[in-house]
Image: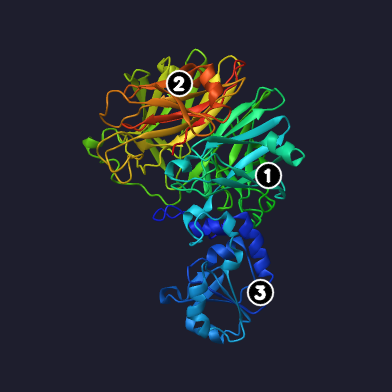
């Protein structure tokens, strides 16, 4: 496993990780290492030696620290020694592992070997033109980055869609620095794209990129770096996979989640008539060693490893059946990657249709929370995981609880089912499920024509909870056979009371809940839609104050319409019906709808739908 810290909840992220992982840093560190003249001493003032040497191995002879508590610790395979001994180290090169290093160098120079060359991580900084905050290199806004699965091959294309939501926080000039890697990790193209000055929509289409740079067919990953941002350091997007050869395939998936994890879950085993391929994409400039990546049936603890290296920034297709032959849905698969990849995608081929979805981070830093089973009555039903029941006449809706923490051994859950008008239709206790369960429930059993359901904790048979409750949702067109699937986790929704960091989405301090969700528009052959849900852990407003706001590609609002939803109710909204063809034409291909509500937090799923039985679906994102 890579010894890297990829997320720090106190700081909102680990900026040093993102600084080291940037593709330009990888190039610059290679050049820096070429200047190392042995013997080499590493001074580690910020405690990043593990990450630096894990991501960029180097021949370092000695390691020095100034914190007496760290003396004797192992970092990067070296034992830390007191800084005051560095002068006697005999080093010809001293590498000081810090950015903005001038003051640090000045303070310790008198302690260093007199003839040693001093190098710092300032030598691997990105150019100032790519920085949002030039005066502080490790400001998190300098590393608003993410990866996207990106393909234009075999009749399938991809399109990244989002909006310049940074403009709402004061940004005036935002642009994207983009780098496309092929399956071998080679750089196919590097370019920039300027975003609208206002909160306008934008897209990056693989067909356009391929034409622009005269590229051969490719499957790889797109690195996205936003510059000039404010408010958010995360690049959020939706990614469509569509058939560019007029085929039937269509799917949508969420952003990549910029933080690598040791394990991921929510990968379904194939049905007998399906092929499930995991797209493994190396997020770093260091190879993934053979034996690091493994697939395992959830709860079996019998991982089957990949017996080959995966090159820097490379993409490899792994057939689940090659690792776990004979394993079929509704069994679940756990993925182990040793923190080498961000959230991977998986692709399911069934007949002539292809769909793509994502797995989720399986947390290794959570333990059961004894406070959840004893939440007071004021918290209502507590944690809820809402998902839509699409119109029953056309769609079959299926859900499956998915363990999403290495410490989750039981899932004590119940299903609460609601009609679209918010009336409760029924409930079903699912039991205290074991980690290796294979439950997948068809919502047809409830007879709901259209509405939603919520997975909630229920401790009547015991069990533990950590608040990281997840599930996979699968939807099948009864006529065409087309399938879409999504997955997400639970939150506490719409109560005046709080528990830890829940509910989320406050406009100011509690209890001012609000909603801002992004809904892309469709095209000439497909209409976009959103399944909006108003979940409530306890009593809240009887009706939401939801509005749909239509924006054009410059970020100008051109129309608005109300879309109230009953508490514990749901609705499916269609922009082409809500606004009409003329307004959508005025919005343009990069226009979008903002789902706004200042009174409650909504949750939603969005996608595209055509007349031939094709559709896509994944959870929405907000900002």
Q: Which residue is mark 1?
A: 316
Q: Which residue is mark 2?
A: 573
Q: Horizontal and vertical percent for residue 233?
A: 48, 49
* Residue 172 seen in the figure: yes
User: Vertically, is 614 above or below 116?
Assistant: above
Residue at point 38%, 49% (across, down): 367
Q: Quadrant of the N terminus?
A: bottom right
Q: CA distance from mark 2 to mark 1?
A: 38 Å
Left or right placement of residue 569 versus residue 400 in this view: left
Q: Which residue is mark 3?
A: 36
Q: Horizontal and vertical percent for residue 348?
A: 62, 31
Q: Secondary structure at mark 3?
A: loop
Residue at point 69%, 53% (across, down): 311
Q: Secondary structure at mark 2?
A: strand
Q: Nearer the viewer, mark 2 or mark 3?
A: 2
Residue at point 60%, 85% (across, down): 90
In the displayed image of the protein, which residue is found farthest to the left? Answer: 377
Q: Secondary structure at mark 1?
A: strand
Q: Nearer the viewer, mark 2 or mark 1?
A: 2
User: Vertically, is 467 above or below 113?
Assistant: above
In the displayed image of the protein, which residue is found farthest to the top? Answer: 393
Q: Horizontal and vertical percent for residue 318?
A: 66, 41
Res 248 → quadrant: top right
Q: Nearer the viewer, mark 1 or mark 3?
A: 3
Q: How many numbered marks does the figure carry?
A: 3
């Amino acid at each position: 496993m890579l010894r890297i810290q990829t997320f720090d909840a106190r700081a909102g992220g680990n900026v040093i990780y993102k600084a080291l992982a940037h593709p330009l840093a990888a190039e610059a560190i290679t050049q820096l290492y070429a200047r190392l003249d042995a013997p080499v001493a590493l001074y580690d003032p910020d405690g990043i030696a593990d990450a630096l040497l894990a991501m960029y191995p180097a021949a370092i002879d000695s390691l020095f620290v100034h914190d007496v508590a760290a003396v004797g610790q192992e970092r990067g395979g070296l034992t830390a020694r007191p800084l005051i001994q560095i002068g006697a180290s005999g080093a010809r090169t001293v590498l000081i592992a810090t950015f903005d290093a001038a003051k640090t160098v000045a303070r310790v120079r008198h302690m260093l070997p007199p003839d040693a060359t001093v190098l710092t991580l300032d030598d691997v900084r990105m150019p100032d033109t790519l920085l949002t905050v030039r005066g502080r290199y490790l400001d998190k806004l300098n590393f608003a980055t993410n990866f996207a699965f990106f393909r234009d091959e075999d009749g399938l294309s991809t399109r990244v869609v989002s909006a310049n939501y940074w403009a709402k926080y004061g940004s005036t000039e935002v642009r994207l620095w983009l780098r496309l890697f092929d399956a071998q990790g080679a750089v196919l193209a590097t370019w920039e794209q300027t975003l609208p000055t206002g909160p306008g929509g934008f897209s990056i289409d693989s067909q356009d990129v391929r034409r622009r740079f005269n590229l051969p067919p490719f499957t790889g990953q797109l690195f996205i770096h936003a510059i000039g941002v404010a408010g958010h350091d995360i690049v959020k997007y939706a990614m469509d996979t569509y058939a560019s050869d007029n085929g039937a395939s269509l799917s949508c998936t969420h952003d990549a989640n910029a933080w690598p994890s040791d394990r991921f879950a929510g990968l379904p085993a194939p049905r007998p008539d399906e092929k499930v391929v995991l797209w493994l994409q190396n997020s770093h400039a260091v190879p993934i060693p053979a034996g690091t990546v493994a697939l395992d049936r959830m709860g079996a603890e019998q991982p089957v490893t990949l017996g080959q290296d995966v090159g820097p920034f490379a993409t490899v297709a792994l057939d689940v059946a090659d690792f776990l032959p004979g394993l079929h849905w509704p069994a679940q698969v756990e993925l182990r990657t040793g923190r080498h990849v961000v959230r991977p995608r998986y692709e399911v081929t069934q007949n002539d249709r292809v769909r793509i979805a994502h797995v989720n981070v399986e947390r290794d830093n959570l333990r059961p929370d004894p406070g959840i089973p004893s939440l007071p009555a004021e918290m209502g039903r507590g944690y809820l995981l809402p998902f839509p029941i699409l119109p029953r006449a056309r769609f079959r809706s299926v859900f499956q609880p998915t363990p999403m923490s290495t410490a989750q051994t039981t899932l004590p859950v119940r299903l609460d089912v609601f009609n679209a008008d918010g009336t409760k239709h029924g409930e079903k206790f699912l039991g205290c499920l074991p980690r290796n369960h294979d439950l997948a429930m068809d919502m047809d059993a409830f007879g709901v024509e259209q509405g939603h359901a919520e997975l909630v904790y229920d401790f009547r048979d015991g069990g533990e909870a950590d608040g990281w409750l997840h599930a996979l949702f699968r939807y099948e067109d009864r006529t065409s056979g087309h399938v879409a699937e999504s997955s997400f986790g639970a939150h506490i929704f719409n109560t005046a009371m709080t528990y830890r960091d829940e509910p989320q989405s406050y406009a100011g301090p509690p209890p001012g809940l609000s909603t801002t969700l992004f809904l892309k528009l469709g095209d000439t052959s497909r209409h976009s839609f959103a399944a909006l849900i108003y979940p409530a852990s306890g009593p809240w407003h009887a009706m939401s104050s939801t509005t749909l706001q239509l924006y054009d590609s410059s970020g100008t609002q051109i129309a608005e319409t109300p879309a109230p939803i009953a508490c514990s109710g749901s609705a499916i909204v269609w922009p082409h019906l809500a606004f009409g063809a003329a307004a959508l034409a005025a919005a343009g291909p990069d226009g979008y709808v903002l789902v706004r509500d200042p009174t409650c937090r909504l949750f939603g799923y969005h996608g595209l739908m055509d007349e031939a039985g094709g559709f896509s679906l994944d959870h929405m994102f907000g900002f």
